[in-house]
Image (cartoon, grey):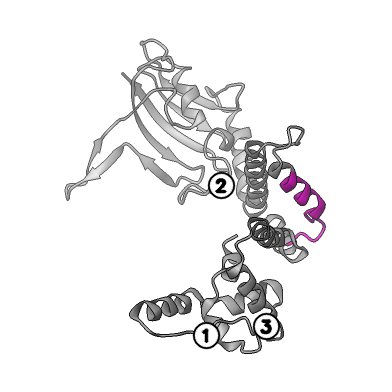
Amino acid sequence: MKKLIYAVAAVGMLAGFNSCTQTPKATFNSETDSLSYAIGVMNCDPRMLPALEDQFGIDSTCYDAFAEGFLNGAKTTDKKEIARIIGFQVGMQSSEKSIKQMNSYFFQGDSTKSLSQSNMIAGFIAALNKDKNAVMTIEDARAFMQSFQQKQYEANMAKQYADWKKQNEEFLATNAKNEGVVTLKSGLQYKIEKEGKGTIATDTTKLKVSYTGKLIDGTEFDSSYKTTGKSNVKKNTPFECTPSSGIIKGWQEILKTVPVGTKCTIYVPAELGYGAQNTGKIKPFSTLIFDIEIAE
């Protein structure tokens, strides 16, 4: 809708269309008259004409028609006519040209896929009429689009980071065979260095976790042990959390699997960590290796 707003605020450009007899003649009898004219000029965004040509193919041969439409819209007070004009503008969002632009956005240049104009129009009208038999509510539609875009993103990341994804999968497969490594049903792996003597935490147990996180190539991406001052002395500031707080699934699971006091190494598959997200040091599909010690 933002792009179409250019077509609603075009007062300043009308002076160039003398052939349009409806164009009012400006008068300057007061400061207010000058202010009114200035607002009109300012409302004519200089990006409007290039945008109209780029988006809709409206060049100088169509400017008179554009001005006529603008004047009709500016003068009409009939609610149905106003609704018709706005409906026309909104409908242009489902035009063939707009669909081509959206195809490029959603399908990343895949010419084998194309949005259905009929379905777009049907969905719009169903929502407009609040049709009880509509296939989707606005909430359903929003969730579907978010899910679709997430799948598209993950598929693109899987192509871009295919080699790294394979390396991480192979690492986990090999690591699972190492002595002392336990693999849970979820795919989470861990190896105990020292088993704690405390109880196993529940969702609401308050814990303090000392940790260092690395990738399979040895890159350290985070740690509770921070070097302070010029002495290069590392100070440990344990991370305070509960198993149900906003932490990755791998941590949620291990904290409810081993007793408090346990010191161990955990190997978190991407699906229990950050998945296809790119978080800087942590590339998409990274296995996260944590040396952790759990305390209350």
Residue that label 2 marks: 284
Describe the element under mark 3 as helix, strand or loop.
helix
Name which residue type carries label 3.
Asp
Q: Do the residues under discs 3 and 2 have CB atoms within 8 angstroms?
A: no
**Nearer to us: label 2 or label 1:** 1
**Nearer to us: label 3 or label 2:** 3
Residue that label 3 marks: 64
Q: Specify the quadrant of the image occupied by residue 135.
A: top right
Q: Specify the quadrant of the image occupied by residue 183.
A: top right
Camera-side residue: 151 or 172? Answer: 151
- Judged left or right of residue 94, residue 245 is left
In the displayed structure, 272 sits above or below 63; it is: above
Describe the element under mark 1 as helix, strand or loop.
loop
Residue 31 spot, x, y in % from top left: 34, 80
State the separation of the CA atoms marked 2 and 1.
Answer: 62 Å
Tag 1 or tag 3, which sits nearer the N-term?
Answer: 1
Name the disc covering residue 25, or none. 1
Residue at 71% of width from left, 86% of height from top? 61
Q: Quadrant of the C terminus?
A: top left
State the separation of the CA atoms marked 3 and 1.
Answer: 17 Å
Name which residue type carries label 1.
Lys
- Judged left or right of residue 293, residue 128 is right
Q: Specify the quadrant of the image occupied by residue 58.
A: bottom right
Tag 2 or tag 3, which sits nearer the N-term?
Answer: 3
In the displayed structure, 8 sits above or below 193; it is: below
Residue 271 spot, x, y in % from top left: 58, 35
Residue extent of the magenta highlight: 109-125
Residue lying at the far front of the rendered structure? 29
